[in-house]
Amino acid sequence: MASAFISSRTCVLLALLLGLCTAGAAAGRVDDGLEVTWGDGRGSVSPDGQVLTLSLDHTSGSGFRSKDTYLFARADVQIKLVPNNSAGTVTTFYFISEGPWDVHDEVDLEFLGNVSGQPYTLHTNVYAYGNGSREQQFHLWFDPTTDFHTYSIEWTQQHILVLVDGTPIREFKNHADRGVPYPSSQQMRLYGSLWDAEDWATQGGRVKTDWSQAPFVAQYRNFTATAPPPLGSANGYGQQMDAAAQQSMKWARDNYMVYDYCADTKRFPQGVPPECSMP
């Protein structure tokens, strides 16, 4: 496991410095860290332990969770999304707390399927103490169904950072000292699922699930979750993004972001949330 940790650390550093890291860190069996929790047999782990598969049919989807809970962590996983006509399906990977719902914390990555030939939408959101409505959505700059790609959530005392193949696409900074709720006191567990959301997932629900395409299948591999280094550490993740990482994020947002709650003045006619104007 020591070599896997070093590989993960190196991958993270390259990602932040160059925005070029595309492969997940080497890991042991995927079920060392994850367990299938629902789906009545629709979720499974390959005999060699390398791939966790979720499937969805007209009766049910399926899902998993991490065996551990975390108070700050970086989680990386490689996912191959549902191919062909995936309209109505949602594939997820997210942190969520397990206490009372009205004060829950959550960091969402939800991949909204679409009809063949159209792009997937990566829907992201952050909840803190039950407060959400911080959606940002992105299209991806590759076909996420033909191969595995690495999706990462970095959750530290300083920020929440979402990365795709090592390229940062979203940062939510900790402005709790300025009155903006931030998830910092509740342990969270990682979850993943494949489920039917045809009432809203694809073009606002206008395109429904084509059940003749079922079963729909998504695959996960190379899951790692590591605690952040101590504050002030010279190495490891959790530091402020340098100029190269900021430029990589600007490129992704300029070219592939398709919705930003901070720009939705119709939704917030009295003014967008305060964190939108904080550096």
Image: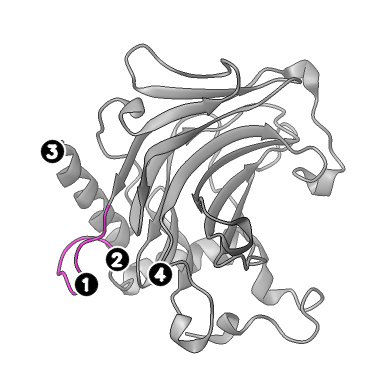
Q: Which mark is residue 271?
A: none
Q: Quadrant of residue 85?
A: top right
Mark 4 neighbour density, 10 Å: few (under 14) some (14–19) many (20 or more):
many
- The CA span between labels 2 and 4 is 8 Å
Looking at the image, can residue 219 be seen? no
- The CA span between labels 2 and 1 is 8 Å
Q: Residue at x 60, y 17 (%)?
A: 40
**Marks 2 and 1: which is nearer the front?**
1
Whichever of callouts 4 and 3 sits on the residue coming sooner in the sequence is 3
Whichever of callouts 2 and 4 sits on the residue coming sooner in the sequence is 4
- The CA span between labels 3 and 1 is 23 Å
Q: Which residue is mark 2?
A: 238
Q: Which residue is mark 4?
A: 159
Judge whether residue 233 is colored magenta.
Answer: yes
Magenta-drawn segment: 227-238
Q: Which residue is mark 3?
A: 3
Q: Residue at x 37, y 47 (%)?
A: 69
Local SS, label 3 = helix
Q: Please, is residue 241 above or below residue 207 in the view?
A: below
